[in-house]
Amino acid sequence: MRAAAAGDVAARSTFSRGYLATVRDFLSQRWRQRVLMADLDDACQEVFLECLKPGGTLDRADESRGEFRGLLFGVTRNVARRFEERAAGLGRLRPEDSAWLEKVQTDEPGQATLFDRSWARALLRKAKKRHRELAIEQDGDDGRRRIELLERRFGDDEAIRHIAEDWGVQAQDVHNAYRKARTEFYRCLREAVGFHAAPGADLDAECRRLLQLLG
């Protein structure tokens, strides 16, 4: 972040790529099925211009305090409001959108929770990607099988005994693999969370909070 704020081109690109998923997901959820979805790319670009411009969000960020999430939510929310007000002024919004517009612009706690869910989904994707890379690098086909196991358990809620039957192995072997896969994934999630956390933050508590946000 220091390098990006100082104008380093590579750092600015890395910063934008790193947070784009969160910003884009939040705006997509806020503007779902509204005419403003046509402005999504422009709005995302404006968020990062606000972050990276001289005197912008990155210049105000305090590394010692961590928790950049709150600053990013603030600038993304403000950009969203500007686009909404512009669209309303140009008559692009439908009359029935007035109640929705008032709600999203005044419901600060609700919008903060919506942003937190977008943040959590982005971190979860990073953790999954890192887990896949490490598992395959370390254990090859066994690592791939553990990734598949997590997807079948979390995504499809498939029973261990059914997976064991499908693989032709003992259920206890699948239980052991599942335990290892969960431990590996949690370590990757903790690493992803720790990258953004304030010094001394309770990473385990933050991981639990993110998982609870996503149900």
Image (spheres, grey):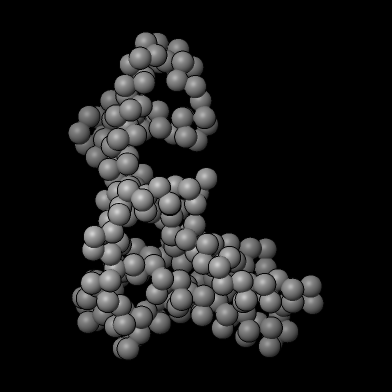
User: Going by the image, does 5 lie left or right of 207?
Assistant: left
In the displayed structure, 120 sits above or below 1; it is: above
Does residue 96 appear to the left or right of 126 in the view shown?
right
Which corner quadrant of the image does residue 17 belong to? bottom left
Say which residue appears at 49% left-offset and 52% top-offset. Answer: 213
In this picture, is 142 found above or below 186?
A: above
Residue 202 in the image: state x and y as whole percent. 30, 54
Q: Do we see residue 88 in this rendering?
A: yes
* Residue that protrudes farthest toward the right in the picture: 95
Instruction: Point out residue 55 in the picture as x, y percentages from the top left corner.
Output: 32, 89
The answer to whether residue 212 is above or below residue 36 is: above
Indicate whether 131 appears above or below 85.
above
Can residue 24 be seen here? The reply is no
Query: Total number of numbered labels?
Result: 0
Snapshot quadrant of residue 5: bottom left
In the image: residue 196, left or right of residue 39: left
Left or right placement of residue 143 versus residue 39 in this view: left
Question: To which quarter of the image does residue 176 belong?
Answer: top left
Q: Pick whichever, 14 or 63, lies toward us.
A: 63
Identity of the residue drawn at 56% across and 83% down:
82
- Give coordinates of residue 211: x percent, y percent: 44, 47
Q: Quadrant of the N terminus?
A: bottom left
Residue at figure coordinates x 40%, y 82% from the top left: 50
